[in-house]
Amino acid sequence: MGAWFTAKGQPPKKPNGKWTIQAQDISYYADIAHADDFGKIAWATGVQRDAHRAIEMIFLGDGARWIWDLVTLNFPNAVQIVDWFHACEYLAPVAKVAFSSPQQRSQWIERVKTDLWAGKLDAVIAACAEQINPQHEDDPAQKAVTYFTNNRHRMDYPTYRANGYQIGSGTIESAVKQIAAQRMKVPGARWDLKSARLVAKARAAFLSGQWDELADRRKRLSKCA
């Protein structure tokens, strides 16, 4: 799922502060497709919204490589930002393995999160690297080091906040809730691939305020002989 929107407001001055940035004029798109095909949908819906003419275009993602590849291909001038909350999710697993005391875990997370908020990526990576344990299979500290290293150029949070950019992907989380959870995960629902795609697309169009326009277009389509 994806969403195009404009954002107004200001991020908080502290990590736990109040967020006032709000997404406005939202249009959603959804599909069950391979990454390349989904990228074409992102490009087409973006052009539909005149996103390619925007003075500033921001893409928020969770850090997945395929997302950034599609953004780079279709919107090479866009600013790429790793969602703040997804980035923070990498810290708790590290603390859980590294420290036995809940207080130590909490203090470590808050210290590293403060450095991340301040854009001190070297300090963040070093703090995680100190906790790497080669004996642990699928070590969360190593995963965190790799994640922050690969995405450090997408985590300049002080600059993003100064520019008034949205750094949280709450809009997409809301889209997932409204399109998938509220409509498609109802009790007793069963979907095949074709029906799931059609319902997701219909729901996205409805929530984007495009339903009446699409219904009108459908009425004017010529019928097959």
Image (cartoon, rainbow, N blue to C red):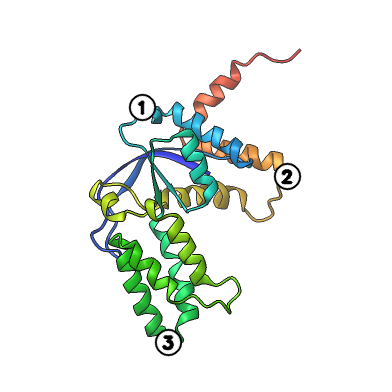
Under tag 2, what secondary structure? loop
Q: In the image, which is nearer the foreground, mark 1 or mark 2?
A: 1
Q: Amino acid at mark 2?
A: Asp
Image height of 90 relative to 65, above or below: below
Locate residue 130: give its quadrant: bottom left
Horizontal placement of 45 versus 165: left or right?
Answer: right
* Relative side of 107 to 13, left or right: right
Q: Residue 47 versus residue 3: which sits nearer the camera? A: 47
Of the residues shown, which amino acid type is indicated by label 3? Answer: Ser
**Image point (23%, 50%), residue name:** 162
Residue drawn at point x = 45 percent, y = 77 percent: 131
Q: Residues within 10 Å of mark 3 (few under 14, many from 20)?
A: few
Of marks 1 and 2, which one's residue comes earlier in the chain? 1
Which mark, residue 192? Answer: 2
Label 2 neighbour load within 10 Å: few <14, some 14-19, many 20+: few
Q: At which x and y percent is residue 46? A: 45, 32
Residue located at (46% from left, 48% from top): 172
User: Counting other residues with Cα less than 10 Å from the Cα at mark 1, is it few (<14), some (14-19), or many (20 or more)?
Assistant: few
- For the residues labelled 1 and 2, the Cα–Cα distance comes to 38 Å
- Residue named by callout 1: 53
Q: Is residue 205 above or below residue 8?
A: above
Foreground pick, 156 / 209: 156
Residue 96 percent across, percent down from the top left: 48, 78
